[in-house]
Amino acid sequence: MLSLRQFLAVVQGRARQVVGIWLAIVLAVLAASLLLPKRYTATAAVAVDIKAPELFNSTNSLNAGWVPSYIQTQVDVLMSELVALKAIDALGLENDPKLREDWQKATKGQGEFRSWIAGELSKKLDVKSTLTSNALYVAYTAPSPQRAADVANAVVRGYIAAAVDMKTEPTRQFTGFFDDRSKKLRVELEEAQARLSAYQRANGIVAKDERLDMETVRLNELNAQLIALQAQVADSGSRRDMARADPSRSAEVMNSGLVSGLTADMNRQQQKLEELLTRLGEQHPQVVEARASIAELRRRIAAASSQVTSGLASTDAVNRSRLAQVESALAAQRAKVLTMKERRDKVEVLLRDVENAQKAYDMVATRASQTSLESQSTQTSVTVLKVASVPAKPSSPLVTLNLAIGAIVGLIVALGAVVLRETMDRRLRTRDDVVMDLRIPMLGELADNEGASRRLLGWSRPRAALPGLAR
């Protein structure tokens, strides 16, 4: 292991070799830099909108953890074969005979030509992003400055087109699905409307049918008539029974004018008969005549009472007949109303079917229209910040940088080479070489005519022991 003093002595002693090796390496680097073909790099920049809904949580705040992943995804899309193929189509590289010749040499005609071009393009493409920005920098390196700018811009355009496709392709698929579904729902709606119309025609029901309301009113009227007739029948029946049991106590008989007049005549005749019996005997002709007159009046009263009772029976029979008619009409009307309600319920079911089919059709048709508009949208979340321009200077080789690196590397190699050679061919250059390596005492140092030191072997303290030899 050489000390610093020994290392500097070795470098000083082999300075010509160090300079020679260093110059050789620097000249080689210069020659290589001048002989290597020039490469030009064109750079374009785009900004990606990270305000996508999936990057936000329920509180509408940005999920910071998703941003690096989202940006890296966009970098991968830029580097993907899809974008490369779009750039190839835009530039027409598939028709380049030199590229086809290179493909033949590289693959022997195996594989797909477009995929090979995309792979070669991706090798020379570089996409960079930063953690603090949503900007992406697209750089492409090519032998021609114009080709570098054209490919970089074509890649950006391909990326934008791919972003549009990724956004609109799902909506196109949904559009087809919703179109098919809307057609089926429209057929179902038409069928539901046809069933409703056919049922309405068959049963004579219109959209605003008031017959049910009218028939219901009539049913209620019949119910009211039935209740009134039942009361009348009960009253007429009780009066008829009372008149049959005791006509004299019947209110109708008592209120009859004929019966009242006959009863009054009979009462006067009885009073007259009592007077005659008081003055005359039982066999007196006037008494007999009075008794015959009273008997006739009683017969006539009984006939009149029977007539009134017969009238009550007739009234009761009429009331009962009317009651039976109303009951029959009520039963028929009730059956009619129930039938109409059943038909109306059926119509309501059919109407609900039509409404549900209409709602489903409207919803799907609206969604189909919305997805159709979205599928035709050309808006993207990508904004071009910088269009790649034709580079004026090559990006490689950089002669100055290469010379600087070559000078540093050459110096390191030269120093390493002389140190290696020194270890293989050691020389005594310093006092440390004598004392430490040879482990013998040094007597002193002699100076040559040029001032270089000459080392003498001897005992320690050479300058003190041989003061005349010291410099």
Image (cartoon, rainbow, N blue to C red):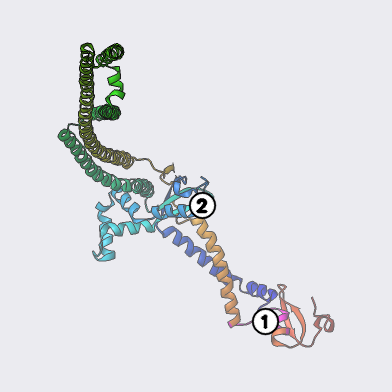
Vertical side of 467 occupied by 294: above or below: above
Name the foreground residue: 14 vs 244.
244
Q: Tag 2: residue type?
A: Thr
Q: Residue at x 45, y 61 (%)?
A: 31
* Residue 342 rendering spot, x and y as whole percentages: 24, 39
Which residue in the structure is indicated by mark 1? 428
Mark 2 falls on what kind of element? loop
Residue 97 is inside the magenta segment = no
Give the mark nearer the N terminus: 1 vs 2: 2
Mark 1 falls on what kind of element? loop
Which residue in the structure is indicated by mark 2? 130
What is the quadrant of the N terminus in the image?
bottom right
Tell me the crowding category of disc 1: few under 14, some 14 to 19, or many 20 or more residues within 10 angstroms, Cα based. Answer: some
* Left or right relative to 452: residue 417: left
Vertical side of 285 occupied by 17: above or below: below
* Residue 205 rendering spot, x and y as whole percentages: 20, 31
The residues tagged by marks 1 and 2 sit, at their Cα atoms, a distance apart of: 57 Å
Name the foreground residue: 450 vs 443.
443
Tell me the crowding category of disc 2: few under 14, some 14 to 19, or many 20 or more residues within 10 angstroms, Cα based. Answer: few
* Left or right relative to 437: residue 422: left
Name the foreground residue: 244 vs 336.
244
What is the quadrant of the C terminus in the image?
bottom right
Which stretch did the figure color magenta? 424-435
Vertical side of 12 occupied by 362: above or below: above
Q: Are marks 1 and 2 in contact (CB under 8 Å)?
A: no
Q: Quadrant of residue 283?
A: top left
Q: Tag 1: residue type?
A: Leu
Q: Residue at x 27, y 65 (%)?
A: 107
Q: Residue at x 28, y 38 (%)?
A: 355
Residue 434 is inside the magenta segment = yes
Q: Residue at x 41, y 55 (%)?
A: 76
